[in-house]
Image (tube, helix red, strand yellow):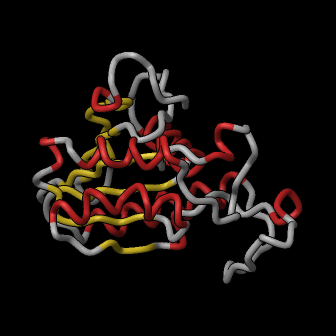
């Protein structure tokens, strides 16, 4: 079976990230710095072979994916299963949208299974590069799965708008590279 490549990105910066407020399933947009991060991400020449753009249905993920999708002339596919872990008690505000998930609170195992199953399904049906924008917790759940099934090194840090590359052969995942954020400038202008 031909290997497909997954390029996983944690959405760019929001004001709530700056304030260290958990967003979860609350639909918070990118701030000005986040929009600039998304623009710089879209300019990466090594993303010119992306054949499919997928993201969480939350606006911060969609806004991170939009500049690249526009540049490549590709539609954005929105996937609710790429959202953060469902924790209703921690997110019960008037802004919290009810979700069609069957359970109100997901444990870590259920959450990881949801994310891995979703990414594996899309990767299996994609030829070429699959560009995915999700959230910090979802990226960490996926990476933890890859590390638990391979001898991948530790030390992964889910950096915002950085490229994390994986291959999938239909059965197993392998990490190619992670944390590639050279497009965001070497001066550390953007907080994580």
Left or right: 114 as drawn, with respect to 41? right
> Where in the figure is residue 132, as x and y percent of width and height?
36, 57
User: Which of 111/191 is in front?
Assistant: 191
Label total for image: 0
User: Which of 2/79 is in front?
Assistant: 79
The residue sitting at 48% across, 55% down in the picture is 134
Location of residue 94 by image quarter: bottom right
Left or right: 86 as drawn, with respect to 162? right
Location of residue 183 by image quarter: top left
123, above or below 76, in the image? above
Name the image quarter holding the N terminus.
Answer: bottom left
> Where in the figure is residue 46, as x and y percent of width and height?
14, 41
The residue sitting at 69% across, 57% down in the picture is 24
The residue sitting at 78% across, 70% down in the picture is 95
67, above or below 47, in the image? below
The residue sitting at 36% across, 59% down in the picture is 65
User: Which of 153/63 is in front?
Assistant: 63
> Where in the figure is residue 148, as x and y percent of width and height?
50, 37
> Where in the figure is residue 76, as x and y percent of width and height?
32, 72
Left or right: 5 as drawn, with respect to 21? left
5, above or below 17, in the image? below
């Amino acid at each position: 079976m031909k290997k497909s490549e997954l390029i996983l990105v944690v959405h760019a910066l929001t004001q709530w990230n700056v304030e260290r407020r958990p967003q979860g399933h609350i639909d918070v947009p990118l701030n000005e710095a986040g929009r600039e991060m998304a623009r710089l991400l879209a300019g990466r020449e090594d993303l010119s072979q992306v054949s499919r753009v997928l993201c969480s249905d939350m606006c911060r993920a969609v806004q991170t994916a939009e500049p690249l999708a526009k540049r490549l002339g590709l539609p954005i596919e929105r996937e609710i299963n790429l959202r953060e872990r469902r924790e209703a008690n921690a997110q019960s505000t008037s802004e919290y949208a009810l979700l069609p998930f069957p359970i109100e609170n997901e444990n870590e195992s259920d959450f990881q299974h949801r994310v891995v199953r979703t990414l594996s399904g899309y990767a299996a049906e994609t030829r070429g590069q699959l560009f995915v924008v999700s959230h910090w917790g979802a990226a960490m759940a996926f990476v933890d799965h890859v590390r638990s099934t391979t001898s991948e090194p530790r030390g992964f840090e889910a950096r915002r708008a950085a490229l994390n590359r994986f291959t999938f052969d239909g059965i197993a995942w392998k990490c190619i590279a992670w944390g590639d954020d050279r497009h965001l400038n070497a001066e550390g202008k953007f907080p994580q």
